[in-house]
């Protein structure tokens, strides 16, 4: 915005002009106007006019021309003396705020905080939409600076923003950048919404257990005044993992680990499986593990909606745009003798194709399947230096979800069942509909260039295994399907969290490999603890930090569905 008070003195031999007050006011039509008082004369100027040119008719044209050509507002309140054609102009200003200049036609947008910006450009570009009924947020889409910049506004990114603001609502500003605000290609929305405690790594079990507790008490966490209490439609039917005689020892080992952490998992023999689930064909099955409590599925959209609604009420700013890259700043405190380059400004392209600068204190990579690209923009894995040579091992992997109809299929209390072949299914609603799918073989990964569905994969890979395990599925009918992406960690299929060892203000929350939705809430809390407290205070996720990629101390998760 412009300075609140501005005293301009233009002197020449013929006339002395004093502009006593320059202020902004909202007139009754909602349009923005400038009020300039010149002694007994008062002039209202619309946003579509150059205020000094309007005032300079006819008698003050010479004096104001000098101002318009030379007027420069310094970055701090001070006095500037400018000379033009024998006249001097003195400006004393007191700032209100500095919120971006709308940019020129083409690629330039709002510069980052600390860069010069013309007040007249602000008036012309940023406020031009107000007279047409637009609010300031739509005219200034990207803040010039923020404490925390979150890249990605899905379940993980919104969770990180929630926990940061929930713990420190007034102490920091948080901005979330999301290039797909409708989440048409977001991994969160395109998942089957499952949550399970049955993992082979202890920390993953703890993460899921916390999410279960959060969802049970979601009204306490995410309710907003004057809005309906959130409800994510949590179905508690559990997961059922089946194992052959060959894989039974590993399943039993995992169940012991899960029970040790506190998960309620029952181990069922072949006979017990047949008695409890009569619709199941147990041929070739030795044992099964069934989650008795806290497992099931829920609606991903409703969770993200509740998180986003709560975040906005807490003051989080959501910005539609795509990250174009970073600009570095010199950190003289990194080492005693040698300064280092650290990340300082993000370049964000908005829908109008303008690139805006946003300064930040720290940036959090929550870009899901595209997290590896964001890391490369920061130089991670794209430089030859020892500190930045190791890339973030996260890439998109396309998966298909099929919707089938089978009126005589498993009943409404059937769990999400995972066959030893990797094929899974779960009930969807009460009308005989089911969701099903499977992960392809490693040498047959589908192309990620588009969102097309491979229906041959269903007829050749999924359906034969489904009908073999559940005989009633022989008479199913395929109704629809969609494709989505895993943020797949191709090293050990586990989370990468914490800050980078070189770029200390660059944080990761990536590589969850298909269980990002069910771990999102807990990962957000853990990252907020690391940022605010300096350590993990509830669930210790230090084994998941980036350093394990440097030391090759990998943690392989064996239960990827």
Image (cartoon, helix red, strand yellow):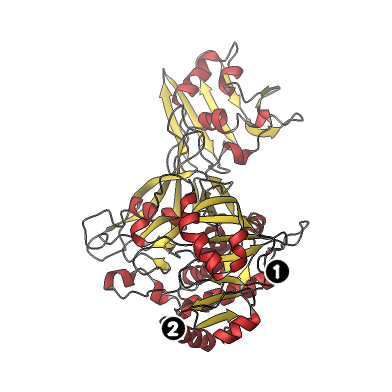
Q: Can the viewer see residue 506 in this picture?
A: no
Name the residue located 53 percent from the left edge and 52 percent from the top edge: 176
Whether residue 237 sits left or right of residue 446 in the image: it is right
Q: Secondary structure at mark 1?
A: loop
| Above or below for 133 versus 61 | below
The picture quadrant where one finds residue 122 is top right
From the image, tell me which residue sits under label 1: 412
| Number of numbered tags placed on the structure image | 2
Task: Tell me where residue 229 appears, x and y as whole percent.
Answer: 75, 62
Q: Nearer the viewer, mark 1 or mark 2?
A: 2
Q: Quadrant of residue 210?
A: bottom right
Instruction: Return the x and y of residue 468 as percentages of the image width and height.
Output: 53, 68
Separation of marks 1 and 2 at Cα, in angstroms:
29 Å
Cβ–Cβ under 8 Å for marks 1 and 2: no
Give residue 365's mark: none
Residue 16 rendering spot, x and y as whole percentages: 56, 19
Q: Nearer the viewer, residue 472 or 350?
A: 472
Q: Residue at x 47, y 68 (%)?
A: 422
Pick the front one: 456 or 381: 456
In the image, taking residue 301 as reference, residue 206 lies left or right, namely left
Report the side of 495 relative to 60 (left or right). Answer: left
Residue positioned 64% across, 72% down in the render: 214
Q: Which quarter of the figure has residue 501? A: bottom left
Query: Of marks 1 and 2, which one's residue comes earlier in the chain?
Result: 2
Residue in front for this viewpoint, 338 or 94: 338
- The residue drawn where x is 45% and y is 31% is 72
Q: Which residue in the structure is indicated by mark 2?
A: 245
């Amino acid at each position: 915005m412009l300075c609140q008070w501005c005293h301009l003195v233009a002197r020449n031999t013929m006339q002395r002009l004093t502009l006593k007050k320059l202020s902004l006011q909202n007139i009754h039509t909602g349009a923005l106007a400038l009020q300039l008082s010149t002694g007994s004369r008062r002039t209202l100027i619309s946003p579509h006019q150059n205020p000094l040119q309007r005032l300079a008719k006819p008698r003050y044209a010479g004096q104001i021309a000098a101002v318009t050509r030379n007027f420069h507002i310094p970055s701090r309140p001070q006095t500037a003396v400018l000379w033009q054609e024998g006249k001097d102009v003195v400006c004393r200003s007191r700032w209100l705020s500095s919120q971006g200049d709308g940019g020129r036609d083409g690629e330039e947008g709002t510069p980052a905080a600390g860069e010069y910006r013309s007040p007249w450009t602000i008036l012309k570009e940023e406020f031009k939409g107000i007279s047409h009924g637009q609010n300031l947020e739509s005219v200034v889409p990207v803040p010039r600076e923020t404490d925390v910049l979150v890249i990605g506004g899905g379940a993980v990114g919104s969770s990180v923003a929630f926990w940061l603001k929930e713990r420190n609502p007034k102490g920091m500003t948080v901005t979330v950048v999301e290039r797909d605000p409708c989440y048409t290609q977001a991994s969160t929305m395109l998942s089957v919404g499952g949550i399970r405690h049955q993992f082979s790594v202890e920390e993953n079990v703890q993460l899921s257990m916390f999410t279960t507790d959060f969802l049970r008490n979601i009204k306490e966490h995410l309710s907003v005044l004057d809005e309906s209490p959130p409800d994510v439609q949590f179905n508690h039917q559990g997961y059922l993992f089946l194992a052959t005689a060959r894989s039974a020892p590993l399943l039993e080992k995992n169940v012991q680990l899960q029970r040790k952490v506190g998960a309620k998992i029952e181990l069922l023999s072949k006979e017990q499986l047949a008695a409890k689930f009569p619709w199941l064909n147990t041929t070739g099955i030795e044992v099964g593990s069934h989650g008795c409590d806290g497992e099931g599925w829920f609606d991903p959209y409703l969770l993200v909606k509740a998180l986003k609604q709560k975040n906005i009420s807490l003051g989080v700013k959501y910005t539609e745009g795509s990250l174009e890259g970073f600009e570095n700043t010199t950190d003289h405190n990194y080492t005693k003798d040698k300064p280092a380059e650290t990340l300082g400004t993000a370049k964000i392209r908005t829908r109008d194709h303008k690139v805006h600068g946003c300064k930040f204190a720290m940036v959090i990579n929550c870009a899901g399947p595209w997290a590896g690209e964001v890391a490369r923009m920061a130089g991670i894995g794209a430089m030859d230096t020892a500190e930045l040579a190791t890339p973030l091992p996260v890439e998109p992997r396309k998966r298909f979800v099929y919707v089938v109809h089978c009126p005589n299929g498993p009943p409404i209390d059937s769990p999400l069942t995972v066959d030893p072949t990797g094929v899974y299914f779960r009930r969807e609603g009460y009308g005989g509909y089911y969701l099903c799918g499977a992960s392809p073989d490693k040498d047959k990964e589908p192309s990620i260039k588009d969102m097309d569905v491979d229906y041959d994969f269903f007829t050749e890979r999924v359906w034969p295994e489904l009908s073999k395990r559940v005989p009633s599925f022989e008479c199913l009918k395929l109704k629809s399907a969609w494709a989505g992406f895993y943020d797949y960690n191709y090293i050990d299929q586990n989370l990468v969290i914490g800050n980078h060892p070189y770029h200390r203000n660059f944080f990761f929350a990536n590589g969850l490999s298909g269980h990002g939705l069910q771990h999102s809430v807990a990962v957000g809390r853990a990252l907020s603890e690391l940022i605010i407290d300096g350590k993990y205070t509830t669930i210790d996720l230090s084994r998941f930090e980036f350093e394990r990629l440097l030391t090759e101390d990998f943690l392989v998760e064996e239960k990827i569905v």
